[in-house]
Amino acid sequence: MNLKTSFPKGVQKDSLLFSLPYDLTTNGERVDGHICITDSIIDVYLEGRVIKSYPLDGFSEFKCEKNYGSSAFTAVKKSGEPVCICVFRQQEFLRYAELAKLLDFYAREGKLITETKADEPTCEKCGIPLDGNAECPFCAKKSKLFLKLIKRVKPYKKYFIIAVLCTIFEQFVWIVIPNISRLIIDDYVVPKNDDWQGLILHCIALVGLVAFTCIPNHLNMKCSFKVALNMGKDLREDVFAKSESLSMTAVTKKTAGELIRRVSGDAAKLEDFVTTNGKDLIVDMISLVVLIAIICVMNFKLAMLVLLPIPIVFLLVDKLFHVMAKRYTRVWRNMTEHDSTLHDILNGIRVVKSYGTEAKEIARYTGCSLKAAKASMRAEIAWYLTIPISELIMTVGNFLVLYFGGNMIIDGGLKLGELIQFTTYVSMLYDPIRRAIHIPKQLADAAVSASKVFEVLEDANGISEDEHPVELDIRGDIEFKNVYFGYREYDPVLKDISLKINKGEMVGIVGHSGVGKSTLINLILRLYDVTSGEILIDGVDIRRLSQKSLRSQIGVVLQETFLFDGSVLENICYAKPGATFDEVIRAAKIANAHEFITKLPDGYNTRVGNKGYQLSGGERQRVAIARAILHNPKIIILDEATASLDTETEKQIQEALGRLTKGRTTIAIAHRLSTLSGADRLIVLDKGRLAEFDTHDNLMRNKGVYYKLVMAQRQTTKMKKA
Amino acid sequence: MSDIIENYEADKLTLLDCKKLEFKKEESGYMTLFYDEKIYHKVNLTRLQPFYEKDKFVSVHIEDEENQFVEIGVIKDVNELSDGQKKLVKGFLEYKYYMPEITKIYSVKENMRGSLFVKADTTAGEKTICIRDWYRNFKLIGGKYLYVCDADGNKYFCDDVEAKLDRKSIAAMEMFT
């Protein structure tokens, strides 16, 4: 990343290590300023003059803070005094964030890194942030979108070619038929020829040809659907697979309704587009060229009368594409909003019912539904207003042909059969043109869906698998080495975490809310990748482990247990699909779940309902523990597993958890510190850093952060009791 | 409810007396507040309703040694402050919520990949605003507040499109909101 992008006038560029512009004051006024850094000084320039200078080694911390509409490059002096060095608009944020990272490292380690390995954050061409994309979404060409779609036909090219050939053959037959009709009219009907044998032969040829087209027609349809349906299936599967493999950062950017729409709705629309248009588009183009050539050869003057209005129609079509694209984008937006609202309301149905807000939610849904319907209606109305106009322009030529052709027959320059053949070809010519008129509507609709589908498929923010992933039989040693992590790279949640958890050890994580406890376990699960440093399991960096191997050996029990809509048995078996019923019962017994399952009317076949709502919180939790036991993990993560349960249920679950964690490396987060009484050691996090890591007794003796937490909690408990 | 008030005073909103508030801009660029014989350093101000009430309900807060949020109180109306104090507070809010206002929209174009280009006049001059994920970052809030966030994260607004934008501007943006 270039950290010398702009310099104040008259400054010697060579002596500067970093030089970035800033454009705001802390009063919100626009200015022209620069921050110039040498190996010893930070100079703040305003309108070309130095207004402040700071010694580079006079700071203990550097930060880049994002505000609502601006950002600030700040630091803390060694004396503890905070300083706001400069403020700027957001386009400079990523560069200042990188600068702050380098200078912060200097403040901590005393080593000044001047060349950063970070990627250039913006597109070289337009200067817009790439945001993890390999290709700039602003500079990418629209045609590439359809090329990508065409490439997806490749696995089915054999069927595609058969379909195209069959259609061309059909078109050829339909071109030959008017020729036979002409022969019948001009050679037999008009001259009243009594050569019945010839007439019958021509008629048989006519009927035979029509009947024969059934075969290529059937083949054509069969192959066309095979291509389109398979392509649609591939797209749906790919979008779904990609959605599943997206990093949590990318997933949280999209609502469930939006992802569902992309997996099903958009992929289906593309499938439909290929079925109705993909192949026909090629065939129509060929037909158009062949038919134009035939009518020009037959009668050039008449052909010109037909062809002249066509460019006007195509001009209209081109203009229409942009209008329709906008309208269909709006339809897409409203439909997505509609789906998300529906998903949101149905998911929160319990809350809706408990607050009696059904009428309010119905009104909310109706509003969304109405908006979507209105947008669709506006798009369709705009479209169907233009159809009669284009139809009129196009068919003007037909009337002219009839008038001038009729005159030619009277003058003897043209035979009746020839005119009928000519007008038949003209009607055939109008078919592909009519379809071409509909193309902008379909193309616009498909382009919107294609852009949404490829947006997911090309998302670069996934957790990538190592080129040669290691399949490890995990023993259970976990080590954090200088780990830094932030959901936004420039804003670390965890800083410089180094610790070692031994195999079979039970470790608790404690700290204030938002200190990074859940983040720490998300990193072990590799739901996110560390910003810097490394996490080792049995000495192997988890980024080198295959994700399947890692996650299949880690069991997780969360506060909010998610059960899929299936039976109790299916939910317990989720982690081990091939488990025998004996194993399931054993797991349920260890989890203290067997008893309540037995009392359920359908036993292990009882359906748990959507998200397991048929069961109580404690029951759901025990099913989740049984699932984790069956999974037989080497490492167990408990995230507030007993937080929302009553004392009696908690006791039962603690008992179950005790059995589950025996001999396994266990990491547990609990707000109630008493829950962690069984922990061998405790990780105490404070302000994103590792404050303490020791046994409960030693931590209490040291009277540090943990001691304060325990005391504060005791105080609260006393207050509640009082 | 009364227990909660008694024990925690959780619902108590501390409205600050505008006559007693004395903000000072420090050399460091941060603000210091003198209030009720107490001094608060590195004071931060937050608009509680940034879309609708820019000068009303402004939270005044600091971070304690534990980096925990501590609210000193809420200024109900910044316009009740003395002229000097008002200028200081409004200046700080102007910087924190730096957001040019859109005064005219010439055209809105989409590149069919979820990106939008809005050519507009703003209080910071004429510019083409590039918007990514436009269905999220170019929207009407409450039917009349236009919220725009560009690819860099810069924000733009128009607090009443019907009253402040001309017909052509509304027609240009209508398709995308």
Image (spheres, coloured by chain):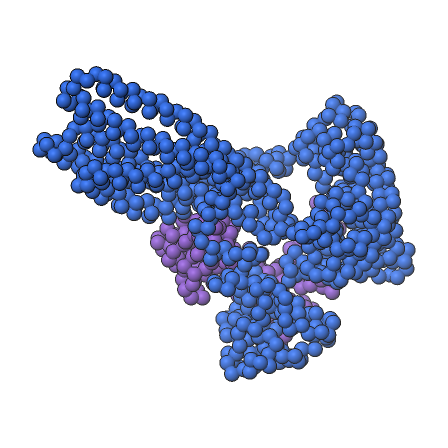
Identified at 78% across, 38% down, the residue is A631
Q: Is residue B79 visible?
A: no
Q: Residue at x 35, y 41 (%)?
A: A285
Chain drawn blue in the picture: A
Q: Quadrant of residue A354?
A: top right
- A354 to B6, vertically: above or below: above
A41 and A475: which is toward the camera:
A475
Estimate the x, y position of residue A222 in percent, counting from the top left.
46, 29
Residue B60 x %, y %: 62, 62
Front-lying residue, A76 or A493: A493
Q: Position of residue A150 (x, y in %)?
A: 47, 44
Chain coloured purple: B
In the rendering, at what x and y percent does residue A458 appear?
55, 50
- A664 horizontally vs A214: left or right: right
Quarter the N terminus of chain A occupies: bottom right
Residue at position x 58%, y 56% from top?
A: A132
